Image (cartoon, helix red, strand yellow):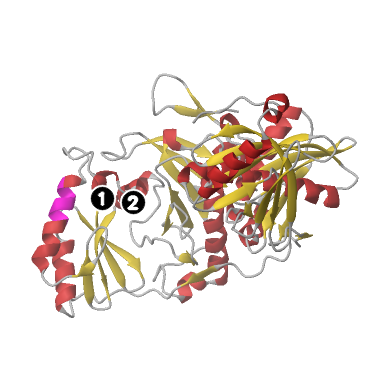
Amino acid sequence: MGPVPGSRKAAGAMPVAALRAEVETFLSHCQEPVLIEPGEAAFTLGAEQYALTEKAEWLLLEAWDEARTLVRRVVGVSERRAARMVLEVAKFGGKAGHVTLADSGRAQAAPALVRGSREVLRELLKRWLARQYARWTAVEATCGADLEHTLSPAFARGLVRLGERRRVPLAAPRGSGDLALAFGLIWLDYVRRRERAAVEGLTLFLPEGEEANTLARLPHLRVDVEVFRYDAQGVEEVVDREDRGNLATRVEPWWEPPPEPQCEAEEWLRQLSLRPGVERVAAQPGEVSLRVHGLEFARYAGGVLRYGVDRKQAAKSLGAVERLAAELARVRDADGPERGHAWFSRNPEAWLESRLRAAPEVLDAGLLHEPMYGQVPAFAGRDRGVLDLLGVRRDGRVCVVEVKASEDVQLPMQALDYWIRVAHHLEQGDLEKNGYFRGLALRREAPRLLLVAPALEFHPTTEVLLGFVKRHVEVERIGLGVEWQWTLRVVLRVEGARRPEWNGRDESAWQWDS
């Protein structure tokens, strides 16, 4: 049922008994009923957690949990939908408002639940600002979406002012602490341009336990950032920017299986590696990955060869694995007839990575083909959504290559995360100690950072974020032509945050502006 026009006068015309019956009927059909008050955490409406009482002019709605009680005078229904009902309420003092009843067990209620959680975060931000910036004026506090300017509704953001001074705060919901810095910097840049005035810095409110990566990034950024953490009760405290703790990273000792097969599985591995189109990649210490255009179909580890695309099983014969490799090569073919097949479109970053492994000189004429490693410093429990390559130039300079095949706001910050860890382990000598780049003399200076993607797939905010990165992080953006699945061609090469200009004649003739 669609929205029902409502007003205080119309709502009051509904008999209280009928209003109660309508509310009770809605709740009786809910699997997991909840009550959402704007700016408050949702109340679960179990059998013993709410009450409805008829009064002369309104329906008294009471809800409670272990820590809170809510009392509202319901005067009407302003909206009815399959999984939610919006009630018009008269608050104490004569103020009008609304509360939402929703069925959290049904997908149709998701927008109301998400909106409610965002409003809670916005109200928390207001409270934090009132405490931490008591002398400042809160000019703005919002969780609205602005897709044009990449302002995410998932984060509450604002603007505070003290005389001519301005700061922008941003609060992250639980589970999004690692993402907050990028969206905070985008918000800071937007407000500076919108206000046409100086904004001195950014204040982040992050969930407790999710601040480590942000703190590790700050020494490498040209921006004043103040960080607070908040706990499950919504109590905030300032975080010492210098207390970054231990980097959540490790370097595993590197070793490769012996070159001559020592068992049947290693013989199968050797034969499969010789098949046309099959890539043999040293994936982890002691493990070998077999791939077709980046998509893994078999992996050797510990004397066992396991194969499969979605689920792997131990190989009992070579023929079964060869048939899978042949089918994958037929499907995952840029010129083939199976472009709609799920295997064709699976993991485009891996396909792009395989192209770059085969021709790293396209990115940097000095890059060696071997050794070229996948992710070396391992991020515990994190799926970063990008692929990392770690290589070295002939002159011993280590290069970090971040590969992304589609737009990603977080690419600059994720790349910085990996660069920080590689630079740390390089300085400590951990790469050589653990058997990486064996026989090569590595230079101790910080690695180069190459961001690689199809030229049209760099997110518009990439330049904004890179503009905050300090110059000691040597970043180069490398954009590839759209035909990268057939041939690698660099059409864009830009240092750091510099903006490229296209002369409009030749796709490969990009120029730097001044």
- Pick the front one: 331 or 443: 331
**Quarter of the view holding residue 49:** bottom right
- Pick the front one: 241 or 495: 241
Tell me if residue 255 comes above or below residue 145 in the rendering.
Answer: below
Q: Which residue is mark 1?
A: 293
Please name the residue shown 39% across and 23% down the image: 506
Q: Residues within 10 Å of mark 2 (few under 14, many from 20)?
A: many
Q: Are marks 2 and 1 in contact (CB under 8 Å)?
A: yes
State the SS at label 2: helix
Q: Which residue is mark 2?
A: 350
Task: Name the outermost residue toward the top.
Answer: 505
Tell me if residue 244 comes above or below residue 85 in the rendering.
Answer: below
Task: Name the image quarter holding the C terminus.
Answer: top right
Please name the residue shown 22% across and 61% down the image: 308
Residue 185 disc label: none
| Residue 20 is a magenta residue | no
- 209 on left or right of 326: right
Please give the range of residues in magenta: 325-330
Distance between the Cα atoms at labels 2 and 1? 7 Å
